[in-house]
Each structure stands twice: as structure tokens, then as C-alpha cells.
Image: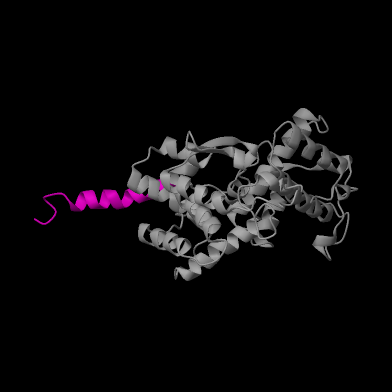
Amino acid sequence: MIDRSKNPDFVNSFLDYSITILNKSPNSIKEYNYDLMMFFRFMMIHFNLCSNDNFEDIEIKDFSINYLKKIELEDIHAFVSYLAINNKSKAATRARKISTIRVFFNYLATKAKIIDVNPAQNLETPKQDKRMPKYLSLDDSKKLLNIAANEDNRNSKRDFAITTLFLNCGMRLSELVGINLNDIDFSEEKMTVIGKGNKERTIYLNKACINAIKDYIDVRPKQAIKLDNKNSKNALFLSERKERISNRTVQQIITNELKRAGLDTKKYSVHKLRHTAATLMYQYGQVDIRALQELLGHESISTTEIYTHVANDQVRNAVEANPLANL
């Protein structure tokens, strides 16, 4: 939960704007709040408004609009430098915080009209190294599914359905946890999920997914499901306490299955199963990159293009297959 009482009014007004107008998700709002809290703690030190004895204890509520108006591009650069040098933040982390700062100052300048000049207007994003996604091979994916299918416990059908959806649909953890019973259309073999930015999209289900979900629903608790703010009554996946399953529980389920399959849990995780699904679909299903973008819910095609790395192997094989290769 965000403690809004610790924020300056202009930060809270930005968060309200992000929720109501930009339709940002609760997770995005938490990230915005965290990023801005860190930014203004740094500015308190930067403008000599407090000591830097304990960064985490710096209060930002009284950061005034007068000081807000004094912030210039070089002050933001000083913050980014602090992140890189003092915090050892990776380029991806700095890029996210820069994105928050850009959106925030754009709001202050163009919407709230609190400042006359946007100091972040020419703020650049640090260059990031493109890293190839880690993913399970086809054989390891089959091994993981086999482990999940042969579990001997009362939650085995639930856990198998979870693993099946991850490996077949490439959905995010939050999307899986958020699935409701009425989100699934068995006649059309599809489901609706809520992705990043509260954006709704359709995921089509293959036979493996349909069968796994139906098998789980047959044994899913029908009585005494707790009614809480997570709307557990409609949740597809339930915990032992008959509440909507948590992110942490799903992560533990996958971690345990990976261990039993003899796979490295430091290398693989829930999110790596998303990478696995995308890579296998591209590598074996010859899926069009635009279709893959739609399936994964990527806003930018450049995000999806990381999965085309598998084409390198295909190119190498094509060269090796040249009849002149062995002359």
C-alpha cells in the first residue's frame, strides 16, 4: 500500500491523474510512487534541505513547489548519476526511473500547469545492452510438464493447469493470478486477461489448456470460498485458504516443479516460462512476429523482437545445408 500522507500534494495529484486518466495499473502506481520518492529524497540532499545520513528516512512531504520549479535538466542528470554510481543501478532500472520522471514532469508542465518549463523534456534514456532471454528447451519444457502432471497431492490438477497455461500461453504472473472463472469462454476456447496498464486482451486456448483447466475446475473448491477484496469467489486459481492464489504461491509452485525436474532455479523462474512459451511458438510454430506481439501483450514490436534470436540458429543451419559447404 502507498502511504500518500508522506507525499507532497503535487505527487499525489500526479498519481491520481495516472490512475483516472492514464488508466495505469496499481502496480504501475506503486512503481511511480517509489521512483518519485527516491527522486525527491535525492533532491532534498541535492538542494541542501537535509543531511544524507540515512537516505531511507528522508521526508519529502514538505518539498515545496518553489524548489520544484528550480529543478533543471542537470539536476535530473545528477540523480541518474547517483543511481549509476552510488546505487549501482543497471541501465534498465535507470531507464524505468527516467520514464517515470518524464511522465511526471510532463504532467506538471502540460496538465497541472504547476511549472512553466519541463526540465525533463530533453531527458535521454540510457543505452541498454540487449540480452537474450533465458528459456527452457522443448525437452525441458516437456520434462517440467511431466513433473507437474505426476504430482501426488491435492493441488496437483491446479498446479498442472498453472504450468500448462504459462508454457502454452506466455502470460504474465499477474495475468494468471487475476483470471476469473467468467473470463474463460470454453465454447470459443479463449480467455480474457488484464495485462500491463490495465489493458484487456484475448488469449486463445489450445486443447492442452482447455483440458487442464477443465480437470482443475472439476476439483476446485465450491464451498466456503472466502469473500475478500481479491474477489476470491470468482477467482479461477485458489489457495489452500480458498482465497485467490497469490503471486508468491504461484512462484513457489513453479520453483518446486523446476527443482523436481532437475532444472536450475537460479536460471529459470515464472517469467522465464513466459520467455519459453514465446520462443517455442516462434521457433516451432513459425508464428508471425506481429501475432506474437498481440499474444504477449507487448506495446512495442521491439520488445517482441528479442524472441527472433532463434532465427540465428536457423540461418546457421541454412548455411551448413548449402551443397557447396563441404567442397
Residue, far left: 327
> Residue shown at 74%/36% (left/top)?
18
Q: Quadrant of residue 179?
A: top right
Residue, far right: 62
Magenta stretch prevailing secondary structure: helix
> Residue shown at 77%/34% (left/top)?
17
| Location of residue 190 in the rendering, given as x and y in whole percent from the top left corner | 50, 37
Queried whether the magenta region covers residue 243, the answer comes back as no
* Vertical position of residue 137 compared to residue 284: above or below: below
* Left/right of residue 82 with respect to residue 164 in the rendered view: right
| Location of residue 142 in the rendering, given as x and y in whole percent from the top left corner | 39, 59
> Residue shown at 91%/48% (left/top)?
62
For this rendering, which residue is in front, 7 or 128?
7
For this rendering, which residue is in front, 111 or 195?
195
Is residue 224 visible in the rendered image? The answer is: yes
For this rendering, which residue is in front, 156 or 56?
156
* Vertical position of residue 178 compared to residue 146: above or below: above
Magenta span of residues: 307-327
| Location of residue 129 in the rendering, given as x and y in whole percent from the top left corner | 50, 53
* Left/right of residue 171 with respect to residue 143 in the rendered view: right
Tell me which colouring the rendered structure shows: one colour
Queried whether the magenta region covers residue 324, the answer comes back as yes
| Location of residue 168 in the rendering, given as x and y in whole percent from the top left corner | 45, 48
* Left/right of residue 269 with respect to residue 113 in the rendered view: left
Is residue 118 visible in the rendered image? The answer is: no
